[in-house]
Image (cartoon, rainbow, N blue to C red):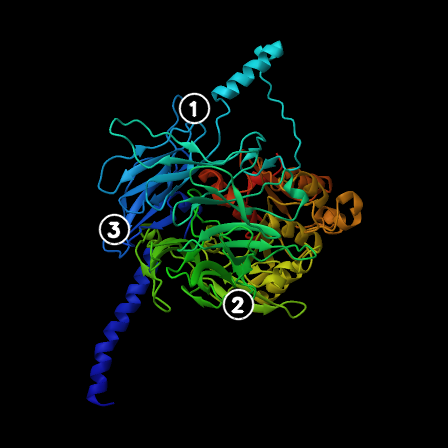
Amino acid sequence: MNRWRWRLVAIALPLVLSAIAARTSAAQTHRPITETDLFKFVWAADPQISPNGSQVAYVLVNVNEDKDRYETQIYVVPSDGSAPPRPLTAGRNDRSPRWSPSGREIAFVRTPEPVDGKPKPSQIYLISMDGGEARVLTDAPKGASSPVWSPNGGTIAFVSTPDSSSAQAKADSAKKAAADSTLKKHVSDVRVITRAQYRWNGGGYTDPTAHSHIWTVPASIGPTGALPTFKQITFGDFDEGEPVWSPDGSRLYFTSNRRLEPYYATGGDELYSVPAGGGAMAKVASIDGGIGTIAPSPDGKRIAFTGNANAKPVRFYDEPDLFIVDAAPGSSPRNLTTAYDFDVESGIGSDQHSPRAGSGGGIIWNRDGKSLVVVTTENGTANLKRFSAADGKVDSVTTGDHEVVSYSASADGSKIVTLVSTATNIGDLYVVDANTARPTPKQITHINEPLFSQLDLSVPEEFWYKSFDGRRVQGWILKPPHFDASKKYPLILEIHGGPNSAYGSSFTHEFLWMAAKGYVVLYTNPRGSTSYGQDFANIIQFHYPGDDYKDLMAGVDEVLKRGYVDSTRMGVTGGSGGGVLTNWTVTHTHRFAAAVSMRSIADWSGFWYTADFTLFNPTWFRTAPWEDPKGFAEVSPITYVANVTTPLMLIEGEADMRTPPADGGEQMFRALKYLHKPTVMVRFPDETHELSRSGKPWHRVERLRHIVGWFDKYLQHVPMSAYDVK
C-alpha cells in the first residue's frame, strides 16, 4: 500500500470511529416510546395558507393531562420557514382559521370557557394580523361554525341552527300551554322516534326539529363595538352543508340531502345554490350517489366536486371520483377519473390524526381553469394529484411514502401547504411550489421534534405477498428497536376497520408502542381495503368476513417464513371492522395465543337493527335479517363461538352507537363465560366509536395499557392479576 493510501486510511479511520461512537451515544440517549407519550404529543390541523402565499395559519392541538382534555390554539408561521411558528390566539378552544381575501384578518371559531359550569355556544371571531385582541363577530344563540369569506371580503357566510327559543317559538309554546294546562307543570323528555336513523355515533340522538342552515354576517365590527346583524339565507326541514361562494360573490353553493327518509334511496347529497342575499334555492347537479367537496372554477362557469357514484347493481363500496359540471342548472356532471382506479379525496387509517380541529383540503383549481389538484390514496399512501380538466390526465404534485392529511392553496394556486404524516412522525407542515414539476416540499414546522428527538422509533418494513388465490396483498412489519433476527419474538397481527379503509404510511402510536414492548407488529391491507382499486375494495360484498380473513392468515404465514417469530406466541387484535375479523379469527383458528377485539360486532342481524346507520339497500347484505336468517348467521362470529379457545379481551365504548356493545363484545363475553373460556370485557364510560382516535386522553392511554397488558399476560407470561376473576 502506498503512502497516499495509508494517509487516506489515517484520515478516514478517526471519522469512522467518531461516527460509530456518535451512533452508539445516540442509541444510549434515546428511549423507547411509551403509552403516556400521548400526553406529550402535539398535532397540527387545518393548515390555511394566506392569499399571497406568505404565511400559514394552522391549529395546534395539545393535551391538558390534568384536565383530561384537548386544547386548541391558532398559530402562524412564514411559508418559507424563515421564522418559528408563533401563537396567534389565546383561547383554549380556537379552530377553523380562515384568511380574509386581503390577508389582513383571520376569522376563526372559538368556544368560550363555560360560565358557572354551563357551556357557551361557539361563535365566530375576527383577529387582525396587525395585532390586537380577537373580537367576537357573532352571538348566534345556537352557535356559529364554518366561516367562509366572500370574494370581496365584506361578508362571512357561516352555518348555524335557528334558535327554537325565538319569540315566535315562545309564542307558539305559550299557545300550546294555554290549550294544555299540564304543560305548565311538566316539560317532557320523552322522544317520539319516526325515522329509521335517529341517533349518530358521537352526536347522540337526533333532534328532528333542528337543522343546520346557512347565514351571512357583515365582516366588520362598528366603532361602538356593536355586533353586526346576521341574516339567515336558507330555510326548511333539511340540513345544508358548508357554503362555498361563487367567484363573483353573487351566490352560495352547498350540498344537501333533501329526502325526508334518505335511507330508502341510493342517492346522497346533491349540489344546490342560493342567491347570496337570500331567495329561492336551485339544484345545480346530482348523481346517482352522493356529492362531497365542491369548488367553483376561477371563472365561475364550472363546478368541480368529489362524489361516490352508485353502480348497478348496488355495490358494497363505491370508489370516490372527481366530477365537473357546468354552473348553469340542468347540466350533466362529467366524471374526470373513470380511468383512474384509485380513491379520490381519501385517507389512510391512523390513531394519530388530530383528535380535534378537523382537517382541510378539498379541490384546488389551477388559476387558468385547466387542471385541478386533490388528494388521492394509492397503495397505502396519500398524495396530491393534478388532473386535467379536459381529459382527466393525471400527474403527481407530491410523491412519497406518507399521508397528505390536509392542505390548502394560495389565491393563485401557486403555493400549497400540506400537513404530512409518516410512519415515524405525527405530522408537520410542508409548502409545495405547485407550478414546478415534481417539486421538493419545504418543511416549515418541526412540531414534535423536542419529544421525538428523544425516542428510538422503528421504521416499518413494507412487503407484498400472494394470498390463497394468487391475489397480491400489501403489508408492513414493524420490528422492536434493536431487533435481532437470531431471536424469536412474539407477534401481534393488527387488523384495520372499515372494512373499506387502509393502513399505510401514517403514524400509529399503538403499533410503535407494541414494538417498543418487544413485539413484532404485522399490519396488512386485505381485500376490502381501499387504495387498491374498485374491484379490490368491493370484492367482499356479501362475503364479509370471509376471504379477507384468508388474506390475513397468508400474511402471518409469510412473516413466519422469515424465522424470527415464535408461532406459539402470536396475538391478534383490531377495532370496528378489525374487531369483527378478530372475532372471526378466534372462531376459525386456534393458532393465536391471545386476542383483543375492540368495538366489534358478533351478530350481524343485531347490528342491522341497532347501528346508527341503516342498511336498507343491498350493499352489505342482500336483504333483511328475517328474510335470510341463514345468510346473516353464516357471517356472524357468534355462530361459531363454541370453537373459541383463544383468551379474548373485549374493549367497548359505552356510548358507541356505530357498533353497539350489545351486538358485539357483550355477546362474545357472555357466551365465552358460559363456555368457561378465558375472557374479560373492558368498558369505557361515555366513549364513542372514536375512543382510539379522539377519546379522552386518559382513556386512550388506559386502552393501550389494557391491550398490551392482555398480550403481556398470554404471550410474555407476565403476571396480570387485574384480569383474574374476583
Of residues 94 and 687, the one drawn nearer to the viewer in this rendering:
94
Estimate the x, y position of residue 376 in percent, counting from the top left.
Answer: 49, 60
Residue at mark 1 to residue at mark 2: CA–CA distance:
53 Å
Amino acid residing under circle 2: Phe
- Residue under label 2, please give it: 463
Residue 233: mark: none
Estimate the x, y position of residue 358 in percent, counting from the top left.
Answer: 44, 45
Amino acid residing under circle 3: Pro
Left or right of 532? Residue 154 is: left
Left or right of 261? Residue 412 is: left
Residue at mark 3 to residue at mark 1: CA–CA distance:
37 Å
- Residue under label 1, please give it: 118
Label 3 or label 2, whichever lies nearer to me, is 3
Of residues 631 and 480, the one drawn nearer to the viewer in this rendering:
631
Q: Residues within 10 Å of mark 2 (few under 14, many from 20)?
A: some
Of residues 325 and 57, the one drawn nearer to the viewer in this rendering:
325
- SS class, disc 2: strand
Residue at mark 3 to residue at mark 2: CA–CA distance:
38 Å
Determine the residue positioned at 61% across, 50% down: 577
- Residue under label 3, please give it: 84
